[in-house]
Image (tube, rainbow, N blue to C red):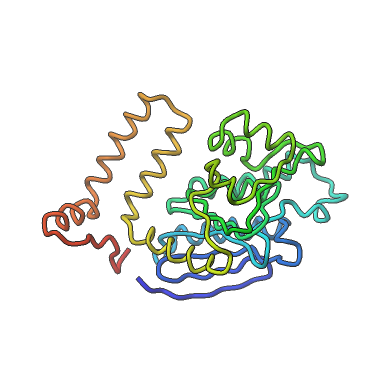
Amino acid sequence: MTHDSVTQDSVILSQTRAGVCTLTLNRPDKLNAANDELLLSLTAELKKAEVDPAVRVVILTGAGRGFCAGQDLSDVSGRDMTFTEHLNATYNPLIRTIRTLEKPVISAVNGVAAGAGASLALAGDIRLWAQSARLIEIFSNIALVPDSGSTWFLPRLVGYSRAFELMALAERVDSTDALKMGLCEHVFPDETFADEVQAYAERLAARPANALKLTKQALNDALTGTLDEALDQEAALQQLAGDHWEHQEGVTAFKEKRAPNFVRAED
């Protein structure tokens, strides 16, 4: 599938190529620190990508040398809004959108990911890091609690005690340690990072979209459910997968000893 389009506004760049929609946080002068405009625009772009038949995979990344430095404190200074109100209006809808999006989301961490930017980096289905990328749960440095999903994502990746240590001491994690800890799946050289991420995403885009949608749903449910609930959910979702044309294509390709084609023009 080849579909090229580029749209641009002040805070989010969107480009779709070969079934892959790349959404780039575009405040490079501030290391892509988040203001309300960026958060709301990113949520809107994700929802557009979800219903766009040309999009099979979404990449989240940052412009310049940072992924996302967290909240732009100047944007909320002096505002008549509580912390709870701000999170419920901006970050929480964004994180929920990523986790419920019916397409794979890749966090392509090209530089520093701090605070809520770390949460955003952790929220993807797949996390790919550049060699120079760094993650820091910086909240305790200003006596705040990790938010935007970090308290849910991080202990599931590295365990409770390591997550607490990273949060309590605001320790910076480099790409080598991130790979060892399981904070990312792959690390690529900075100079080839964008190309490596695109190539990886195109591999993912060639996989069976319906099956991946159902797999993401099953995994999300299993993270908070019992084994019995997971078994029941697997049985129900397996029927949906088995009734889809992708399954027949996979079986036919296996019998014909050829590679399956999971991409149709009408999808």
250 relative to 236, above or below: below
212 relative to 202, above or below: above
The quarter of the rendered structure image containing the C terminus is bottom left
Location of residue 257 in the rendering, given as x and y in whole percent from the top left corner? 14, 59
Write down the quadrant of residue 138 in the picture: top right
Q: Which residue lies at the image location 54% right of the left edge and 38% below the top edge?
A: 157
Q: Which residue lies at the image location 60% right of the left edge and 47% below the top edge?
A: 93
Q: Which residue lies at the image location 58% right of the left edge and 61% below the top edge?
A: 61
Question: Looking at this view, is 166 or 2 the one in front?
Answer: 166
**Residue found at the far left of this picture:** 255
59 relative to 241, above or below: below
Question: Looking at this view, is 165 or 46 the one in front?
Answer: 165
Location of residue 75 in the rendering, given as x and y in whole percent from the top left corner? 80, 55
Question: Looking at this view, is 84 or 119 the one in front?
Answer: 119
Q: Is residue 262 left or right of residue 256?
A: right
**Residue found at the far right of this picture:** 78
Q: How many marks?
A: 0
Q: Which residue lies at the image location 24% right of the left edge and 54% below the top edge?
A: 246
236 relative to 112, above or below: above
Write down the quadrant of residue 57 in the picture: bottom left
Location of residue 229 in the rendering, given as x and y in whole percent from the top left corner? 37, 27
Location of residue 149 in the rendering, given as x and y in whole percent from the top left corner? 61, 40
Q: Is residue 102 left or right of residue 206?
A: right
